[in-house]
Image (tube, grey):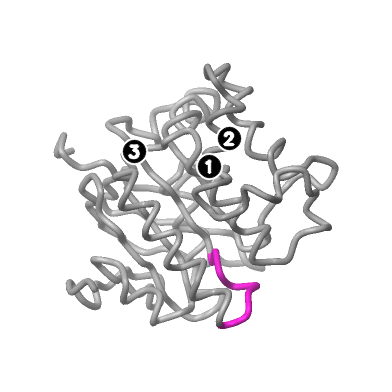
Amino acid sequence: MNPTNIIELQNVHYQIPSDNSILDIIKACDLRVQPHETIAIVGRSGSGKSTLLSIMAGLENSTSGQVTLLGQALNDCSEDQRAQIRAQQVGFIFQNFQLMPSMTALENILMPLELFQIEDAEQKALKALEQVGLANRANHRPAELSGGEQQRVAIARAFVTEPKVLFADEPTGNLDEETAEQIQSLLLELNKTLSTTLILVTHDNHFAQRCQRVYQLINGHLVEKTETAQ
């Protein structure tokens, strides 16, 4: 493990039982991610992109190989230890937003701050809402917000604890093209402002090309497509 790498995968495999055989989802994946990099992973539907993201974040265990996140070998950690690593240092954004429907936008953003007993929680949550352009929607519940607004709340919640790594799984997959473009720009802008490391799974090649490096998952293998960033 290179100590400068914030994420490192070494010969990672992931297999699941299928009928009377074993199905290889991830095959011999290697990846090294430096702090503050933006990495996109693309591939056809069902290719294993979300599974690979879960393995990197320690939500799933690889079948074999070594996964290191923030200097910790996840394969050697218990579930409680992996959860502790993720706690304040890792953020998540999902396609379906995963907001608490009974809570207001502000309360959804406050949740991780209160969980970790962070000082000035409400002030930080209000600032996060302002950063995503929703200062006037603080008291609205998810059902009262558009899909784009809900994803803005989810982005604010993910960034409010200032994580070192942000994992985003199809964050614009449920949005119309114009809204998706706005959310993409917001996500990349906040990521740059807060010097976060971004690992993005997307089916949107245009979005992927806005990242510094793009990888494609082909038949379980991770193949680098480009090194150019916009």
Q: In whole angstroms, how far apart are the C-alphas of marks 3 and 2?
A: 27 Å
Figure check: 154 above or below 203: above
Label 2 close to label 1 by CB (< 8 Å): yes
Image quarter where the N terminus lies is top left
Of residues 139 and 66, the one nearer the viewer is 139
Q: Which residues are magenta?
A: 170-177
Q: CA distance from mark 2 to mark 1?
A: 5 Å
Residue bearing the label numbered 3: 69
Q: Nearer the viewer, residue 39 or 54?
A: 39
Res 104 → quadrant: top right
- Residue 176 magenta-highlighted: yes
Q: Secondary structure at mark 1?
A: helix
Residue 177 vertical position relative to residue 97 in the rendered view, above or below: below
Which dot, 3 or 2, sits closer to the camera? 2
- Position of 192 with respect to 135 (left or right) is left
Tag of residue 128: 1
Q: CA distance from mark 1 to mark 3?
A: 26 Å
| Horizontal and vertical percent position of residue 88 | 47, 29
Can the viewer see residue 77 in this picture? yes
The residue shown at (31%, 61%) is: 39
